Structure formats: C-alpha cells, structure tokens
Amino acid sequence: MSLAGRMGRLGTETAFSVLAKAKALEAQGREIIHLEIGEPGFDTADHIVEAGCRALRSGQTHYTPTAGIPELREAIAADVAGSRGIEVASEQVVVTPGGKPIMFFTILALVEEGDEVLLPNPAFPIYESMVNFVGGRPVFVPLRQENDFRFDLDEFSDGLSDRTKMVILNSPANPTGGVLTPEDVTGLADILRERPDIFVLSDEIYSQLLYDSPFTSIASEPGLGPDGRTIILDGFSKTYAMTGWRLGYGVMPGWLAEAVARLQVNSNSCTNAATQYAGLEALNGPQDGVKEMLTEFRARRDLIVAGLNDLPGVECVTPQGAFYAFPRITETGYEAGELADLLMEEAGVACLSGMGFGRYGEGHLRFSYANSRENISRALEQVKEVLQSNRS
Ligand code: PLP
C-alpha cells in the first residue's frame, strides 16, 4: 500500500510539528515557553463569543450556502472596499474555514503543471507546498535583513518569465514581520501592469497588525483590483484572535469565486455556521479590542527586539508588522535548526528555525511574540543563559 505520488510534493508547516514536540516535553513535566506558534494568544472578545453562542442557540446549526452566508459576504465586501478604497461586490467574496484554504483553492484552480509562481523566500511554507503539489514551479525572490525583508524590485522583475502564472505577496509578512512600503507597492504594480496575464495572490492576513504606517494593498492600485486578477486573502484569525474558530475569506474575480466555491463544495461544503455569525459580529461590532491588541503587541515587539539584540551573536531588525521577530543568529556559531533544538531542550523556549520558511531563512530564527511580556522576558533570560554557557 502506498500514498499517491503527489503526496510526496506536499510540504507542511513546522510551527505545528514544533508545537507538538513542545507539548510532548510538557507532558513529561518540562516547562516550555511557547514562542513558536503564530496565533495572537488573546481570547476572542466576549461580544464575538456571545454572537457565536447566540447563533447556535437560535438554530444556526445547519449547512450554509457554500460561499458563505449572504450577510457575512456583504459585510466583508463592504469592509474590504472601505479599507482598500476599491469596489467589491459580495459575489466576489468566498468565506472559508480560515484564510489558508484560499491558498489551497486558488492555486489548485489556477496553476497548471509547469507554470511558474513567483514567491518570497523566506515565506509562509504553504505557498511553496501548494505550488509543488499542483506540479507548478516555485521561483523565489529572496527577502534579506539588509533590505528590511522587502523585495528588491529588480530581483522581483528578473524572476518573471513567460511561464509565470501567479505572484504571491504577503505584507505584513510571516515570518519576518517585514512590510512592503507604499513605494514598493507602486513599484510592484508598475511591473505587474506590464504583465496583465499574471494573477496576484495577496496574502493580507496581517493587514491590521501594522505598527508604524498605514496598510497599503496592491489591490488598491489601478488595474490590480480583485475585479481583474488579484485575489485578496484575509480573515479573522489574527485580527480578532479567532484562530480556533476557523474563519477567513478570499476576494477575487466573480468567475474565480465560483470556481473556488466549487472546490469548497467538493471538500468541506461550507464554513461552520455559528462561526460565520461570530465573524459578522466581529466586523459590525466594536473594534476597540483590535486597537488594544495592537498596542500590546507593540510593547511586546519592543521588548523582544531589545532583548534579542542583547543576546551574544544575535542581531534583530525591528519588525514593522505581524507578531514575529526574525533575528539573524549566524554569529552565535550555530545553524538555525541546531539552535532552535538547543533552545527547546536547554532553555525551554520553543521557536522556529528560519529554514522552515525556505532556504533564505537559514541563519535566522522566528520568534512569535504572541505571548505575555512576562513570558517573553523569562524566555529571553533563559536563552541568554544557554547562549552564554555554550559559548564559554
Ligand atoms: N497567511 C499567513 C501568512 C499566515 O501566517 C497564516 C497563519 O499563520 C495564514 C495565512 C492562515 O491563517 P488562518 O489561520 O486564517 O488559516
């Protein structure tokens, strides 16, 4: 008995395997500080939880339309239109269990065997996994610390070929916390306007987790809206601390939305009904929780960046968005995977090797600072002790 050959091309997300390893150590009585998993670490706001409970009690326990309940699709269309300054019809919105299925479905729907997909590296590993899975060819554009983990636009341009079918953008970015500046976005738009045959998958899941500048989307650029060839991926996991509810969406051309809904009906039928009502409340209800979370994340970011830069051999630039720090650790003398293992075993701190995000992630670790300031401080102390004792 064996798996289908295509399974050999499907990757994974190391955050989940490292989390499992940390949990196994905890089960043996070890104390581990979790800086590996990418979730806000706050509980969902009460008014959102209440809306989910109310929906269940009032009988929202059935299948919903495949692309989502009409009220939520409309609310998402209005929200995306307002935040990006574009026109969006609710027919362009597909609601999914988390933002991730939008990668799965759109790549499956659009990328043919042999097509090239241009994507950042290091990046969220599922992009590469999915492109490989469907027989496409990932072409990487490196993101370097020297350039604040932004694209070099010449390198981006050089990566395009006659076979390029799609480019993937992610700003603010996982794992680096890097952000495309407004100038980067217009530069990218100028390049892409020359290539109207290319789809753009713009992963904007961290669009509300930006510290020092307003969010800019490629979809706001003339000729690059979701009515043409851009797919906006966004959702509720990070913005509203709703990772476990599983609620995200894509905004895309209507014809593609129909195809994506067809993939959804063939796989999971629809998104959980009560979760969709909770999402409706998240969009329509008070937004104070989002602002408070951002203020707290900023304080955590400043704490972890200062602490990382204080470690021997570690150098960390200040991330502009999301909740990840991606320090360079080459001067410690360790490789990234080796150091991540050492920190888990000896410091009781779970973090990820940059290699889990692609080969340009070598020499870096990813720390998610979605943990309390107290735990972050404790983790930094424990890491410092291990680095110092292994040096001397
Ligand atoms: N896109 C990026 C860049 C992410 O980091 C994540 C989650 O970590 C997702 C998408 C998926 O989010 P969701 O939990 O809504 O599926």
Image: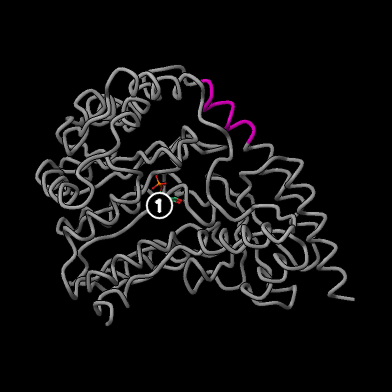
Is the residue indicated by label 1 positioned so its CB lies within 8 Å of ligand 1? yes
Task: Locate residue 214, reporting x and y percent.
Answer: 47, 34
Residue at x 63% of width, y 55% of height: 367
Residue at x 55% of width, y 52% of height: 37
Residue at x 58% of width, y 51% of height: 324
**Can you tell which quarter of the image residue 283 is in?**
top left
Q: Nearer the viewer, residue 91 or 305?
A: 91
Q: Residue furthest right?
A: 392
Q: Residue furthest bottom?
A: 1
The magenta-colored residue range is 288-296
| Quadrant placement of the C terminus | bottom right
Q: Nearer the viewer, residue 125 or 308?
A: 125
**Residue 214 covered by magenta stretch:** no
Q: Which residue is mark 1?
A: 170
What kind of residue is marked 1? Answer: Asn
Lateral position of residue 43 relative to residue 168, left or right:
right
Around disc 1, counting alpha carbons within 10 Å, would you say few (fewer than 14), some (14 to 19), or many (20 or more)? many
Which element carries disc 1, helix, strand or loop? Answer: strand
| Vertical comparison of 69 with 389: above or below | above
Task: Locate residue 362, reporting x and y percent.
Answer: 57, 73
| Quadrant placement of the N terminus | bottom left
Task: Locate residue 276, reporting x and y percent.
Answer: 31, 30
| Vertical comparison of 364 with 26: above or below | below
Q: How is the image coloured?
A: one colour
**Can you tell which quarter of the image residue 158 is in?**
bottom left
**Residue 291 covered by magenta stretch:** yes
Lateral position of residue 137 relative to residue 170, left or right:
left
